[in-house]
Amino acid sequence: MKKTSTILAVLFIAFFLIMGRSQWFSEIMAQAEIGRHPLYSETMDLSKTGKFKWKVARDSWVYNEYRNGEAELSLVFDRNPEIPSEQYDKKTFPLELKVTAYAVTKDGVRINRLVENWYYKTDEPFSPESKMGSSWGRNKISYIIASVLFYSFEETFLEIDVLTPDPVLAKASPRLKLIGEHDYAIYGHLPMFYLIRDGGLALCLILLAVLAWKLLKKET
């Protein structure tokens, strides 16, 4: 009877340790998941003036927990071997855009959803007053062009007016990318959190198994 009680107690503790694993650093892991699931639009035509429209439906987000809040909007280019690196630099390319973001209520009212603050000062991201950043990777180059406010009960529309085209960058598969607001700094610390979470769980289970073995040995 004692042996059965010991086994059941060990299994009960092990079960709750394993089930509780998902709650360890849950907010940090949620931030990481948001960053891993961006949305991409279709390819835009930057070779001529015109308007590109993207409807971001309520159920577009792959990571469903991100449905409310700000999302960073970027213009992404593929690195094309036929395009020199300097052609991707906003200091040299002629491209000029105007960004519009809005939601339409059930009553047909159009509401501006473009964020305006000390960082997002203009709806023309490549104008001289814009100081928004960029990311240069081995295969892709992206420019932050706006921040958009999303609500789960709305469908949001993004419009990009090409004011001055760029036939060169038009060959780099230009498209829009939306990524939910999250802390980019956490990615450098994720290995430590994984080690603490999964390594700690493994150590707890090993110690529990050793303790159970000793108790069972003592009872026999």
Image (cartoon, grey):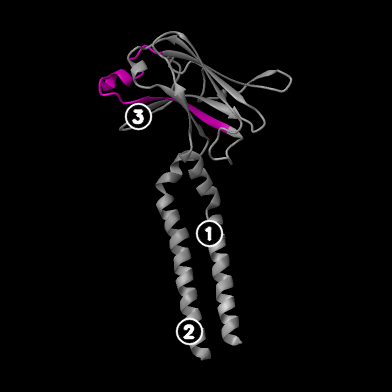
Residue interval drawn in magenta: 70-95
Tag shown at residue 214? 2
Disc with the residue nearer the chain's start (1 vs 2): 1
**Which amino acid type is marked by label 3?**
Lys
Q: Residues within 10 Å of mark 3 (few under 14, many from 20)?
A: some
Secondary structure under the numbered disc 2 in the rendered image: helix
Residue at 43%, 62% in the rendered image: 199
Q: Which residue is mark 1?
A: 21
Give how far across and how far down residue 101 sits, in percent.
57, 20
Q: Is residue 13 magenta?
A: no
The answer to whether residue 196 is above or below residue 111 is: below
Tell me which label, 3 or 1, sits earlier in the chain. 1
Q: Is residue 171 above or below residue 68?
A: above
Residue type for callout 1: Arg
Residue at image location 71% in from the left, 18% down from the top: 108
Q: CA distance from mark 2 to mark 3?
A: 57 Å
